[in-house]
Image (tube, rainbow, N blue to C red):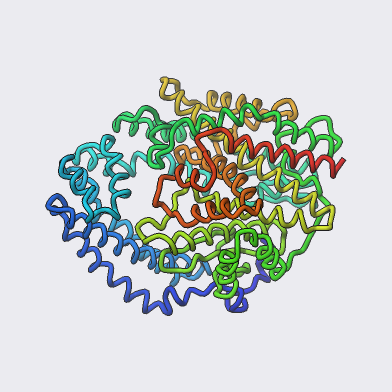
Amino acid sequence: MSNSVQQATRSEIPENMKWDLSDLYASLEDWDKDFAQIAKKLNNFNQYQGKLANCAENIKLALENSDALDRLLEKLYTFAHLLSDEDMTNSENLSYLDKISSKFAEISGATAWFTPELLSISDNKMDEYINSDTLSFYKRSLDEILRAKNHILSDKEEALLGKASEVLSSSSKTFSMLNNADIKFAEIEDEDGNKVELTHGNYIKFLESDKQDVRKAAFNAMYDAFYNLRNTLASTLEATVKRHILSVNLRGYDSALSAALYPDNVDIEVYDNLIETVNEKLPSLHNYYNLRKKVFKVDSLNAYDLHTSLIPEFKIDVPWDTACNWIREAFKPLGKEYCDILEQAFDKRWIDVLESKGKRSGAYSSGCYDSKPFVLMNYNNTLSEVFTLAHELGHSMHSYYSKEYQEYHYADYKIFVAEVASTTNELLLHDYLMKTSKDENLKQYLLNHYCDSVRSTLFRQTMFAEFEKTIHSNVEKGLALTADSLSEWYYNLNLKYHGNAVVLDKKLEMEWSRIPHFYYNFYVYKYATGHSAACILSKNILSGNTELLDAYMGFLKAGSSKNVLDIMKDAGVDLTTSEPTNIAIKEFDNTVTLLEQSLL
Ligand SMILES: [Zn+2]
């Protein structure tokens, strides 16, 4: 905001604090040369159109050429998107991203023949091909495509649905436009009495304020704005849920939930187990809220009192070099090989460290098969940014291992397991700092940070998952989603999750209307299962047992070469049982107790 005037330009940032994209492409001319190869690679693939049924060899060659095309596209895209994120006001850089993005859309139309043609091969013939030596490498991938066969419609129907898809998804686009562009929030008074317009960006800062007036004003301004749009937002959410259910009915799935879990081959029991287990353990969350009441010496907490730090006076400045050293030490239990590779992140410039003018905000890990696993940061010397660094390096090291140990075809890991490595590394950092720090306030901060992250990933995301299940099954039963019914269901669910420890402002009933994830089709439960898995895996790593560490490294190396639940089971976590969630909540209980002993 105000300090953006003094923000450094990219050229003022020292080289060693910037990522090095040069071995991806040394120049934009090289990028252009590769871009010109797309047409040839597309032709190589498309020459097999109409010939897949002839022999197993043709299927293999088609897949190889498809991989070669995808690999080139990803390389071009990765470079363009990283470059444009360096300075989003640079329109020349942005033009490369536009160029490759529209190419992607064109290619996906031009290669759409493959799956329907593959599925049109008779069962007998396909059975023979798929079990032949020729296709042994691709067997898993082909089995996955064939698994969906019963749910794929005729060519004509698929073509119709394809043409209708943009219109069918317009309600989620409407939500996104409203939520990101058109919605306006009232001005509120900040801590110094200045009038500030509330935005999505500053909302959480206000909720973390020490002053209840400020928090309450932000909360009111947020939900008043959504309340004014409640009927529109109920209709966009209802249309999205109905689209999921329409496709379920057309494709012959049992329910919207089972259809959404189908691509990951995850059983509904995993989803239901999570909700049931968390429900049983809600007293653990209520206990944490009660601790907050005791620390703040108040009789009741409201919905806008849950985000303030329990150690408000604690401030720590962590210079970049210190952060890197903490990470090095914290990751040591992962073994020498892991740490040696990690050094490349610092030496070979995987990381774009500092904020600069026009740079994309936030943090991410990104790359492709032919690049380093890059990390974008906007490092500002806070402890929470050190955790972000641990998180993003967790993703990047996972990508590194998957690429190193898997062929291109199986190197990409699924979203279901994506947050496990990143969260595991955050927990390793937590453990390291707890064990080595002498500063009592720092320890309190760490315990508080831990409790809040379990609250927001495990408890809150499970509540979202439960809400998603409710609204889909209610539409499946024939109920209408109206602003009133959505608010009533959502508020009641919140009463259950918050318990008697929190007095919930009635305005919270509108929160359903501002959560983008409710448009993602049963996505959020993966955050919760990911946290539980990471909790067990970090304990395994810290135990010093080499077999358990090897099992974990197996997970990092697995890519998408197996089913996600099998990958997790081999790593040491059985997500088909309630055990991981129970262990994660037990750890949460222990942490709340430590925090209580330290603060009271
Ligand atoms: Zn992440």
Closer to us: 384 or 542? 542
In the displayed structure image, the side of residue 527 where residue 292 appears, left or right? right
Q: Is residue 308 above or below residue 49?
A: above
Q: Say whether residue 552 is visible.
A: yes
Q: Is residue 319 above or below residue 427?
A: below
Question: Residue 102, located in which quarter of the rendered image?
Answer: bottom left
Q: Residue at x 63, y 69 (%)?
A: 354
How many numbered marks, from 0 up?
Answer: 0
Give residue 30's position: percent from left, percent from top: 37, 78
Q: Residue at x 41, y 20 (%)?
A: 478
Q: Is residue 364 above or below residue 228?
A: below
Give residue 397's position: percent from left, percent from top: 53, 61
Give residue 198's position: percent from left, percent from top: 65, 47
| Quadrant of the rendering where the C terminus is positioned | top right
In the displayed structure image, the side of residue 534 where residue 286 appears, left or right? right
Give residue 341's position: percent from left, percent from top: 55, 68
Q: Residue at x 52, y 39 (%)?
A: 574
In the displayed structure image, the side of residue 81 where residue 317 appears, left or right? right
Question: Residue 236, located in which quarter of the rendered image?
Answer: top left
| Quadrant of the rendering where the N terminus is positioned | bottom right
Q: Say whether residue 357 is visible.
A: no
